[in-house]
């Protein structure tokens, strides 16, 4: 075998155990194998009990090199620190994602000047979606997997086949050490320790005059459990990007109207939206008359599922109620993975329908009423002897870049309708008529002038609403955030496992005590992965039970500093 | 007397008990040389009295918390005042836990003042009970905020112990380059704490004197429809304006020490009138911190670190290292649960997304990553002791930035925890 590290080339221990390359402490007796270690003073390196890891193979190939890279704790720390610094950079200016409609290429320059422009140019305005940040997260994921696998298997092997009798040097170079003369009969004295150790929760193994006591080994798996949880968490977060697992849309729901949720078979009806503010009596004196604090936003919502005629536009869809909920902030509607969150509201009344009549301006005669829905109007209407057929509909009337009429948005802010009227006294091909149901729009867009141009001077028909009861408004609009997120359960499972691992790893400690009595001398070594203070105190208490009085501090072998 | 009145009274009692306890802890340690008794006996005796005093303070603090909760009808952690008072209470809880494990009287000399400073900082904010806005009406307000604060409090105790480790181990007599560097860094850390005390001192001094000056700034913005929109912003300075907001008019100026107008104007990149006011506060804090530091140096005639160093004589540095690590190790899972996991659960319920890269969320993550790096570094050789202690000190700076700095400097969804 040709090794680059001649120091570890001879891996056979004097106790006869053949160790793999990279072993620091003999797997069987714990004697330091590394000759540098062997000659040295001070504490032993007890990480992973000194066993060899996969990453310590000789003659690494490409895969081994990648493995070795990610298995290094040092690399993991670099990755953590880089992610930390990257995250910090992203908070200097608000991220693009915090705005609904901005032009990022000009916004940062205009708002934050040159620094803002540099920030944008560097791509920091979308730090958390940038390739380098996502790469860092993926690398952390790789590091989590490989670091854990590299260590947990050897450690598991080492801890399940521990030998009771360890090399003297293994004992004397622990951080808690006691070497003291002992005249008692070795085996009997060691046996006397079993009871006090068991009372403290230790599991005890005896090999003649040598003893191994161990407790809370499970705590050693804490870090690996944390890492498994983090991997599940990260995978779940990645999975949210897959199509079909995730839906996120902001929709407007007018009061009293069942509105379809796109890409689903569901309809949601906002039966009543309420906003309440704190009254002066409920506010501290300092705020009265100065501040307005909201108390409640609530949408009484009913969710329907479409059972038939869902896609046929000529028919009313058949809806059946599946659930209802009073949606508030902190209390979303939830049904089979679909959630509806209170997001925003608008108290401006929205026109829903009008019932105008056709009036002959020459005679003053009015014909019959018909119902004109803003959202889904019928195609033809009848008013007296006249037939009105709907040619065009604009929800939010305006002119586009070419000066043509167009709808600026799908919301009925300024509805407008173009009819073709046919009937007595009108030309054969009919007469065009523009109708703005809102009085304000009639004036702003000059309905009169438009129609005069369309119908010529002999025009004698007007559409009029004769009574306010013929106008139907939705009192308010509630904006809901509709979400489906099928990966969420995995996110929570991952987080739960992380938490479990944290508790195992941090609130218990793996404690081990080795001792051997030989030649009238007791040699005791102790190891724990944290809380040496409590551990030393425990050893002292146990030894006290067999009338061996030791000072806590004298156990401390911490590099000779104490 | 109403519950809320009782609440604020008992809060003040807690404050004085803590201050008394701090003095007793100090006497227990400093007095061991010149009390007639054996040093150990003296320390044990006064340490016990000090612990009783600080525990009584904690009981009063709890009484404040419970009565304010009853009086206001919701858990008092909903604004900056309430959060800071709660944080200071949790720091005392964390201190008591660590003290119960390690029984190191000296910890009281360093951890209790951290709590006192946070408590005093709370008093900077308006103290009225505010009704809850809809987004805060959730059981997760109780869980998320309290657990996050508890976790952070253990980090605060880790900070105190880390600082003690440094004060204990840095060689203050050496003139070697590396030692000089350590001395200067420790001195800078202590100076920063004094600046915070200077900030608190100037806030309360000017508030006591009823100082106020007012600036107005009118802003004309042109909206997309081409219509000019003029907004008038008004800002009231509670400290004499050294610096005025960028492009502002003086509405009312109360002269201070013969100064009748601001000395200069904030630079243009400090947008908004509040940026100017905050800048002014920073200047005052530095100024009063410098004065305070100067006076202290004049009295003791040596660097503060060197002066405090002998207090820690005879304390085992390995114990301090272990206390630092242990405090952080206890706090870390609590912090993870409170500041990240419950934060995500709440965010999912309130906003429909468990994570949105809001500045506060990011900084909670930064804190978590920082302490993760700390815990991993503890595995490496050469990172116990000195370096680890520095990380514990730095880590608390990250925590405080997350709690205070983010609100002051970066606005985000957590803006209701407003800082004024």
Image: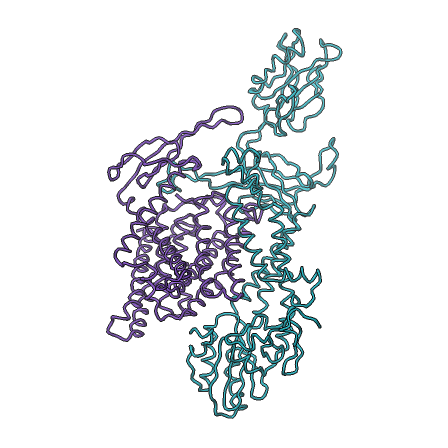
Front-lying residue, B257 or B307: B307
Q: Quadrant of the N terminus of chain A?
A: bottom right
- Image location of residue A502, percent across then percent down: 55, 63
Mark yes or no: residue B55 visible. no
> According to the colouring, which chain is purple?
B
Total numbered labels placed on residues in the image: 0
- Left of A166 or right of it: where is B249? left
Image position of B163 with respect to B360: above or below: below
User: Which residue occupies 53% across, 51% down?
Assistant: A85
Q: Quadrant of residue A143?
A: bottom right
The C terminus of chain A lies in quadrant: bottom left
- Percent x, y of residue A299: 56, 40
Residue nearest the viewer, comparing A388 with A396: A396
- Give the color scheme: rainbow, by chain, secondary structure or one colour: by chain
Chain A tint in image: cyan
- The picture places residue B347, in percent across and down from the top left corner, at 54, 48
Name above or below for residue B28 compared with residue A538. Answer: above
The answer to whether residue B315 shows anywhere in this view is yes
Q: Which of A391 and B413 is in front in this view?
A: B413
Please tell me in which quadrant of the rendered image residue B396 appears.
Answer: bottom left
Going by the image, does B176 lie left or right of A226? left
x then y, percent, for residue A25:
60, 75
> In the figure, is residue A66 to the left or right of B198?
right
Q: Quadrant of residue A358?
A: top right
């Amino acid at each position: 075998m040709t090794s680059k590290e001649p120091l570890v080339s001879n891996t056979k221990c004097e106790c006869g155990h053949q160790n793999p390359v990279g072993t620091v402490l003999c797997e069987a007796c714990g004697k330091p194998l590394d000759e540098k270690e062997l000659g040295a003073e001070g504490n032993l390196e007890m990480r992973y009990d000194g066993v060899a890891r996969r990453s310590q193979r000789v003659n690494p190939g490409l895969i081994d090199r990648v493995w070795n890279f990610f298995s290094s704790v040092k690399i993991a720390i670099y990755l953590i620190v880089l992610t930390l610094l990257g995250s910090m950079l992203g908070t200097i200016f608000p991220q693009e994602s915090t705005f609904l409609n901005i032009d990022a290429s000009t916004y940062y320059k205009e708002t934050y000047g040159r620094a803002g422009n540099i920030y944008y140019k560097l791509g920091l305005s979308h730090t958390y979606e940038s390739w380098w940040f996502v790469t860092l997260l993926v690398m952390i994921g790789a590091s989590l997997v490989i670091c854990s696998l590299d260590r947990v298997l050897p450690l598991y092997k080492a801890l399940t086949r521990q030998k009771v009798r360890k090399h003297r040097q293994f004992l004397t170079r622990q951080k808690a050490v006691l070497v003291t003369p002992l005249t008692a009969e070795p085996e009997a004295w060691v046996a006397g320790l079993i009871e006090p150790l068991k009372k403290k929760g230790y599991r005890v193994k005896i090999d003649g005059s040598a003893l191994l006591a161990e407790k809370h080994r499970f705590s050693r798996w804490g870090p690996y459990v944390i890492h498994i949880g983090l991997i599940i968490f990260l995978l779940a977060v990645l999975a949210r990007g897959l199509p079909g697992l995730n839906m996120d849309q902001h929709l407007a729901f007018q009061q009293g109207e069942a509105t379809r949720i796109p890409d689903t078979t569901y309809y949601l009806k906002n039966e009543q939206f309420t906003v309440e503010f704190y009254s002066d009596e409920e506010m501290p004196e300092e705020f009265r008359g100065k501040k307005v604090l909201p108390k409640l936003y609530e949408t009484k919502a009913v969710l329907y599922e479409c059972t038939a005629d869902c896609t046929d536009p000529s028919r009313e869809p058949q809806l059946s109620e599946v659930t209802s909920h009073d949606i508030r902030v902190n209390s979303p509607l939830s049904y089979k993975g679909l959630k509806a969150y209170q997001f925003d509201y608008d108290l401006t009344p929205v026109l829903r329908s009008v019932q105008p009549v056709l009036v002959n301006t020459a005679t003053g005669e009015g014909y019959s009423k018909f119902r004109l829905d803003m959202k889904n109007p019928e195609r033809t209407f009848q008013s007296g002897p006249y037939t009105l057929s709907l040619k065009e509909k604009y929800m939010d009337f305006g002119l586009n870049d070419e000066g043509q009429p167009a709808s600026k948005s799908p919301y009925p802010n300024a509805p407008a309708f173009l009819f073709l009227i046919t009937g007595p006294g009108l030309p054969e091909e009919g007469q065009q008529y523009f109708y703005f149901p809102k009085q304000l729009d009639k004036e702003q867009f000059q309905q009169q002038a438009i129609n005069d141009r369309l119908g010529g001077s002999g025009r004698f028909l007007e559409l009029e609403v004769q009574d306010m009861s013929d106008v139907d408004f939705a009192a308010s609009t509630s904006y809901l955030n509709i979400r489906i997120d099928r990966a969420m359960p995995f996110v929570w499972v991952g987080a739960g496992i992380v938490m479990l691992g944290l508790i195992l790893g941090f609130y218990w400690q793996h404690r081990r005590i080795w001792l051997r009595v030989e030649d009238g001398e007791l040699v005791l070594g102790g190891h724990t992965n944290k809380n040496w203070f409590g551990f030393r105190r425990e050893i002292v208490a146990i030894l006290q039970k067999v009338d061996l009085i030791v000072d806590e501090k004298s156990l401390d072998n911490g590099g000779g500093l104490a | 007397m109403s519950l809320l009145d009782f609440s604020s009274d008992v809060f003040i009692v807690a404050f004085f008990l803590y201050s008394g306890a701090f003095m007793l802890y100090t006497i227990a340690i400093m007095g061991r040389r010149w009390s007639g008794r054996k040093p150990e006996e003296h320390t044990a005796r006064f340490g016990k009295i000090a612990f009783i005093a600080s525990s009584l303070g904690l009981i009063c603090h709890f009484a404040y918390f419970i009565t304010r909760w009853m009086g206001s009808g919701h858990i008092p952690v909903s604004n900056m005042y309430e959060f800071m008072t709660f944080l200071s209470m949790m720091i005392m809880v964390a201190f008591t836990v660590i003290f119960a494990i390690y029984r190191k009287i000296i910890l009281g000399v360093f951890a209790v003042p951290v709590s006192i400073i946070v408590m005093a900082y709370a008093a900077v904010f308006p103290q009225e009970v505010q009704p809850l806005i809809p987004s805060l009406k959730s059981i997760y307000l109780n869980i998320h905020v309290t657990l996050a604060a508890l976790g952070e409090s253990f980090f605060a105790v880790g900070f105190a112990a880390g600082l003690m480790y440094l004060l204990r181990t840095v060689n203050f007599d050496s003139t070697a380059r590396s030692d000089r560097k350590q001395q200067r860094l420790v001195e800078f850390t202590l100076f920063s704490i004094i600046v915070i005390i200077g900030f608190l001192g100037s806030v309360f001094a000017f508030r006591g004197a009823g100082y106020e000056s007012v600036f107005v700034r009118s802003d004309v913005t042109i909206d997309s429809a081409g219509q000019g929109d003029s907004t008038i912003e008004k800002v009231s300075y509670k400290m004499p304006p050294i610096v005025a907001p960028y492009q502002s008019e003086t509405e009312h100026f109360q002269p201070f020490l013969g100064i009748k107008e601001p000395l200069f104007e904030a630079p243009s990149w400090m947008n908004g009138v509040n940026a100017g006011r905050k800048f002014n506060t920073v200047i005052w804090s530095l100024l009063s911190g410098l004065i305070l530091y100067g006076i202290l140096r004049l009295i003791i005639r040596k660097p503060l670190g060197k002066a405090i160093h002998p207090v820690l004589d005879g304390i085992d540095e390995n114990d301090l290292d272990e206390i630092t690590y242990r405090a952080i190790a206890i706090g870390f899972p609590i912090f993870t649960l409170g500041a990240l996991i419950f934060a995500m659960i709440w965010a999912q319920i309130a906003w429909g997304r468990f994570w949105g890269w809001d500045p506060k969320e990011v900084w909670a993550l930064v804190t978590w990553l920082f302490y993760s790096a700390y815990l991993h570094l503890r595995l490496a050789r050469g990172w116990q002791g000195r370096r680890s202690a520095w990380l514990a000190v730095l880590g608390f700076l990250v925590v405080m930035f997350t709690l205070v700095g983010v609100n002051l400097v970066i606005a985000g969804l957590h803006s209701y925890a407003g800082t004024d």
